[in-house]
Image: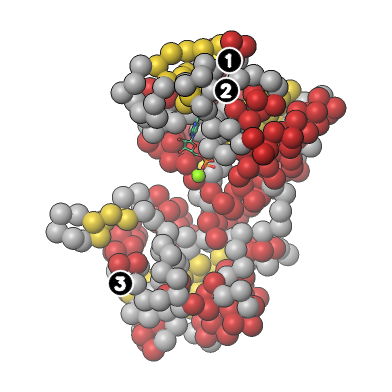
Amino acid sequence: MVARLADLDVAGKVVLLRADFNVPLDTDADGATIITDDRRIRSSVPTIKALTDRGARVAILAHLGRPKGEVVPRLSLRPVAARLSELLGQPVAVADDVCGPSAAATIASLSDGQVAVLENVRFDPRETSKDPDVRTELASQWAAMGDVFVSDGFGVVHRNQASVTELAALLPHAAGLLVEKEAHVFSTLLTDPARPYTVVLGGSKVSDKLGVIKNLLARVDRLLIGGGMCFTFLAAEGYSVGNSILEADQIDTVKGFLQDAKDRGIELVLPTDLVITQEFSEAEPIQVVQVVDGVPDGWMALDIGPDTAAHFAQLVEASKTVVWNGPMGVFEMAPFAAGTIAVAQALTKVDGMSVVGGGDSAAAIQILGIDESLIGHISTGGGASLEFLEGRTLPGIAVLEV
Ligand code: ADP
Ligand code: MG
């Protein structure tokens, strides 16, 4: 179990809070930075409020984009701090540097219940250094400015970085509410899921998810495979897949998974029909083909077919625990979104625990207008959620364990 926020003494203390503010940005007609999706900022509000309600002085550490250890003005956290201030309904001070005189002065100016954001931690090359001593040097500078540390950036807990792991080792610490919830959900999925337990996997590449498949095969009752990764499975079963995405070098590995599923008595369900087209575009005519008939030469499959979608939805709804990672098709184009919509809607009807992991899958839920309140948990960490499902130890979680 991770150390809990409720057990940490924060009243009147300077709390260094690692948050995940890595939001997508765009620029408006006047060249001003706009935040196109503020979900990550919103997700950090409960922890910040819990801290300010208890009289903490909150100094937030976060990264934005990949400035690669240099100050990149376009990746300043100022616009994020402005949005956070709106969400909190109180002023948010902003430091001009990561750990220098401005950060120190900004923190020193805080009263109980006030909030500040320090500048993008990745402006400092030491944040992501491969050398733990270098990371500790940066973490020590922060530790000197604060009393306790709270880790709430779930999107970065799979990384060894100064503001994630080294800082936790230097100060009394606890998980924030978001990290605590994510860690609880994923450890339940791995250790104590209610059954039947179904995992739906999709997305673009099977090679991205080999570790996830391997680890889950030992735990689930059913594994449903759609998306771009299903063609390597279908090819391994001897079906022709035309021009669909195929990772020929993974066919042997996938054959091993098919055998492993058989040996364990796990239902590994592949599509029986597919939506196909001749060009990667929504303008082209589309058809539905049966998998047994094969995808014709010159055609590619960009979604699971209607029979498969209905079957997957039925299996999902009949489960007590469901994890979904990876879109069933190229949902970004309307003619190929139906499979993903069917699975996402089925997820809202699960009588039990439903979890969405993976960046594009979480985005799909939002873009496709699925009612998020009906889904048990939508993970805020794409990479972190996948590493959890692989059964790996996440360094930013391990350092919080009690
Ligand atoms: P996640 O981020 O949820 O883990 P991935 O990054 O693995 O998901 O994959 C998401 C991408 O997979 C989407 O952009 C989607 O268009 C693509 N995809 C799904 N099905 C197919 C397919 N049949 N052919 C090509 N790309 C696909
Ligand atoms: Mg992705």
Q: Earlier in the sequence, mark 3 or mark 2?
A: 3
Q: Are marks 2 and 1 in contact (CB under 8 Å)?
A: yes
Q: Is residue 284 visible?
A: yes
Q: Is residue 81 left or right of residue 256?
A: left
Q: Which mark is residue 189?
A: none
Where residue 272 sits in the image (x, y, percent)? Answer: 60, 15
Where residue 376 sits in the image (x, y, percent)? Answer: 55, 37
Q: Nearer the viewer, residue 218 or 228?
A: 228
Q: Is residue 124 left or right of residue 270?
A: left
Residue located farthest toward the front when viewing the structure as drawn: 297
Q: Earlier in the sequence, mark 1 or mark 3?
A: 3
Q: Which residue carries the number 2 mark?
A: 241
Q: CA distance from mark 3 to mark 2?
A: 47 Å
Q: Which mark is residue 73?
A: 3
Q: Residue at x 77, y 26 (%)?
A: 266
Quadrant in the picture for residue 102: bottom left
Q: Earlier in the sequence, mark 2 or mark 1?
A: 2
The answer as to whether callout 2 falls within 8 Å of ligand 1 is no
Mark 1 element type:
loop
Label 3 Cα neighbours within 10 Å, binned few <14 / some 14-19 / many ≥20:
few
Residue located farthest toward the bottom when viewing the structure as drawn: 101
Q: Are marks 3 and 2 in contact (CB under 8 Å)?
A: no
Three-letter residue code for mark 3:
Pro
Label 2 Cα neighbours within 10 Å, binned few <14 / some 14-19 / many ≥20:
many
The quarter of the rendered structure image containing the C terminus is bottom right
Mark 3 element type:
helix
Q: Which residue carries the number 1 mark?
A: 294
